[in-house]
Amino acid sequence: MKITRDTKVFITGCGGMLGKAVYERFSPHCQVLATDIDVNEQWLEYGDVADFQKISEKALKFEPDLIINLAALTDLEYCEKNPEITWKTNALGAENMALISKRLDAAHIYISTAGVFDGQKEYYNDFDQPKPMSIYAKSKYYGEVIIEKMLDNYFIFRAGWMMGGGCDKDKKFINKIFKQIQDGKKELFVVEDKLGTPTYTVNFAESMFAIMQTELFGLYNMVCEGSCSRYDVAVELIRLLGLEKKIRINIVDSDYFKDEYSAPRPHSEKLQNLKLSSRGINYMKDWKECLADYVESIRPHLKAES
Ligand SMILES: NC(=O)c1ccc[n+]([C@@H]2O[C@H](COP(=O)([O-])OP(=O)(O)OC[C@H]3O[C@@H](n4cnc5c(N)ncnc54)[C@H](OP(=O)(O)O)[C@@H]3O)[C@@H](O)[C@H]2O)c1
């Protein structure tokens, strides 16, 4: 499907960290109707993926050629403590949006996670068998399976450690570290026993935009090139901010955070973009290059004295 001015794209969960980049990539080229339960931008409308009646009315009226479902509950601890709403949002929501795509014969994009694996080995390619551990991962994996069963013209893109969205929307690692720096912390505690592949929202959205037009439908791992530990990411962030001499990073193991981060997490969430590379459509860049780009957008939020 070539994206033109007439192409209609319906996006759910577009108020989050990835949604911002996806909206900015798609909206200059086509007609976008962006929705979320959190209407935090003037270009967003209310839309709840768990409410089949209302979300299908909205989508059927718009008649999209493509549905991009970004809606999810993404806080692992919240998901573990609130399984019912997690299943309704992440799993039933995915099924609802797939049903709507089927009715409209619209192409479909669903975002899954590196967290569907159990982390027993270091690297996972697109053909490895998922074995989700947490409620979040199980509900996201259900979304993968149901979409593969129901649809033909779908893309499932598995993302890794998401970075992006800026200080207001970034709920993940970079912003958690950045907030501590903003608060004047001179000492950070970071784990080295969690491994993964960072995934920059801007690069991810660019890649989605290009790949969906190839119509090479299917499931793809789609993460930045290069892999690392959480500690490596923190070191690089501090270096890019020029704070190596002012902030000390202490290595700890996951036990240190066992109360704060109580949901089960795989030891390794490193993905390989085997299918993207083999098909010559791997547009994902090196994570350090991406982090450098992201840091330039958040740097102005740092107080001069830090
Ligand atoms: N963040 C990561 O590290 C990561 C990694 C791999 C894959 N993913 C996947 O990437 C996709 C985008 O996530 P993200 O990183 O942009 O996370 P995000 O910032 O949490 O965005 C998800 C958005 O969905 C909204 N939402 C929650 N329940 C909804 C519902 N019932 N109907 C409609 N919208 C709803 C959220 O609103 P609230 O903020 O009010 O909950 C939020 O605005 C998700 O499918 C996620 O599972 C994320």
Image (cartoon, rainbow, N blue to C red):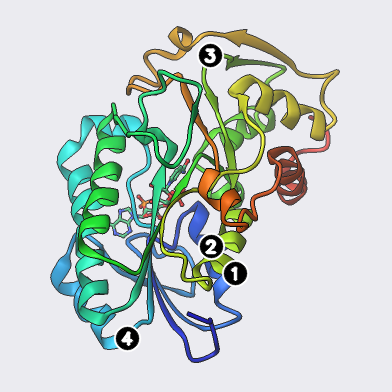
Establish if 2 lies above or below 306: below
Q: Amino acid at mark 3?
A: Asp
Along the horizontal axis of the image, is 26 left or right of 265? right
Separation of marks 2 and 4 at Cα, in angstroms: 22 Å
Separation of marks 2 and 3 at Cα, in angstroms: 30 Å
Which residue is painted at 72% across and 17% down in the image? 186
Separation of marks 1 and 3 at Cα, in angstroms: 35 Å
Q: Amino acid at mark 1?
A: Arg
Using a 10 Å C-alpha cutoff, classify the residue at mark 1 as few (fewer than 14 neighbours), some (14 to 19) or many (20 or more). some
Q: Amino acid at mark 4?
A: Phe
Q: Amino acid at mark 2?
A: Met
Q: Which residue is mark 4?
A: 62
Q: Which residue is mark 1?
A: 25
Using a 10 Å C-alpha cutoff, classify the residue at mark 2 as few (fewer than 14 neighbours), some (14 to 19) or many (20 or more). some
Q: Which residue is mark 2?
A: 208
Establish if 298 lies above or below 254: below
Sequence-wise first label, 2 or 1: 1
Along the horizontal axis of the image, is 64 left or right of 123? left
| Mark seen at residue 193 | 3
Q: Position of residue 137 (x, y in %)?
A: 31, 36
Quadrant of the snapshot with the C terminus = top right
Separation of marks 4 and 1 at Cα, in angstroms: 20 Å
Sequence-wise first label, 1 or 3: 1
Sequence-wise first label, 2 or 3: 3
Along the horizontal axis of the image, is 224 left or right of 9? right
Which residue is painted at 27% across and 56% down in the image? 148
Q: Secondary structure at mark 1?
A: helix
